[in-house]
Image: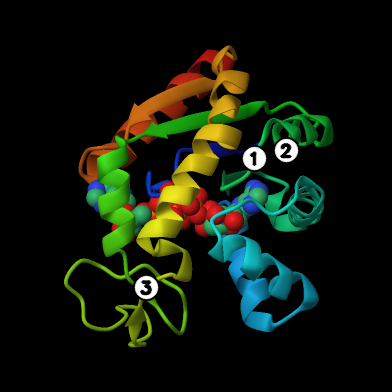
Amino acid sequence: MGVRLVMLGPPGAGKGTQAERYARNRGIPRVSTGDILRDAVQSGSEMGVAAKIVMDAGRLVSDEIMIGIITERLSRPDAADGFVLDGFPRTVGQAEALDDWLSGPAPLVVVDIEVPEETLVRRLSTRLICSVCGTTAVPAASVCAKCGGALTQRTDDDLEVIRERLRVYAKDTRSIVEFYRRRSTFRSVDGDQPQEQVAADIASAIASVEGVRQ
Ligand code: AP5
């Protein structure tokens, strides 16, 4: 059984960047609830239209919708041998639902990426993404490195919305760090370092959990 990993951290901590990289290295899917919701917005579905209003305000989509989305996604065959969750869970209700839903021999490994608030605000307010494929742009790029699309700001990376996302994180999401912290499979890493170093620290944190389990 591959790893079942939850990547925690505030907006801008680098969850997406690191989840993508780790999932690719391990050959398991990265499941990003933010990406799933943005795809729904793009498709113009009823759920996407409703989610866009909530996301653009920096608030959270309801637990009921998110738990439905994630249990459907994790039921697909490609997640049977492990996955990396990015952006889920975000409330204690979601964390409890995930525990209830999961069974089997591999416990959740939880990695929390810690980054100071001023760094988060700087990263998010300067981030550009591709308007076509959604990929985060590399620094100083003028077009998307993946598809050549034009770069744009994410609609929730407006400074006022960033502040609201950070408030919502402190109010609703930080408590799940405490929910998981007492588990032997919880690790935290310093995310205020170059991406390569954060990736190396995450890989050793996960290896240390897997070493204990063997
Ligand atoms: P989501 O897309 O999950 O947004 P988020 O949690 O706010 O996280 P971000 O994607 O902004 O940041 P990240 O931590 O992934 O950092 P990244 O790697 O991109 O969710 C969006 C919205 O959807 C939510 O606000 C909510 O409305 C809704 N939603 C989603 N899930 C939900 C749920 N479960 N329940 C309810 N609602 C939900 O990096 C950020 C930037 O920093 C990038 O430019 C990157 O290149 C750069 N960077 C990364 N690492 C480093 C580094 N080490 N050094 C320098 N720069 C770095």
Instruction: Give the amino acid at mark 3.
Output: Gln
Q: Nearer the viewer, residue 142 or 22?
A: 142
Q: Nearer the viewer, residue 159 or 193?
A: 159
Q: Is residue 21 visible?
A: no
Q: Earlier in the sequence, mark 2 or mark 1?
A: 1
Mark 1 vs ligand 1: CB under 8 Å?
Answer: yes
Mark nearest the camera among 3 and 2 is: 3
Q: Secondary structure at mark 1?
A: loop
Q: Position of residue 1 (x, y in %)?
A: 66, 36
Please name the residue that numbered disc 1 is placed on. Answer: 89
Instruction: Give the amino acid at mark 2.
Output: Gln
Determine whether label 2 and label 1 are within 8 Å by CB: yes
Left-right relation of 169 to 194 = right
Q: Position of residue 116 (x, y in %)?
A: 29, 35
Please name the residue that numbered disc 2 is placed on. Answer: 94
Q: CA distance from mark 3 to mark 2?
A: 29 Å
Q: Residues within 10 Å of mark 3 (few under 14, many from 20)?
A: some
**Identity of the residue drawn at 30% across and 60% down:** 125
Q: Position of residue 46 (x, y in %)?
A: 79, 76
Q: CA distance from mark 2 to mark 1?
A: 5 Å
**Identity of the residue drawn at 70% across and 82% down:** 44
**Identity of the residue drawn at 52% across and 23% down:** 210
Left-right relation of 167 to 114 = right
In the image, which disc is placed on residue 153?
3
Q: Residues within 10 Å of mark 2 (few under 14, many from 20)?
A: some
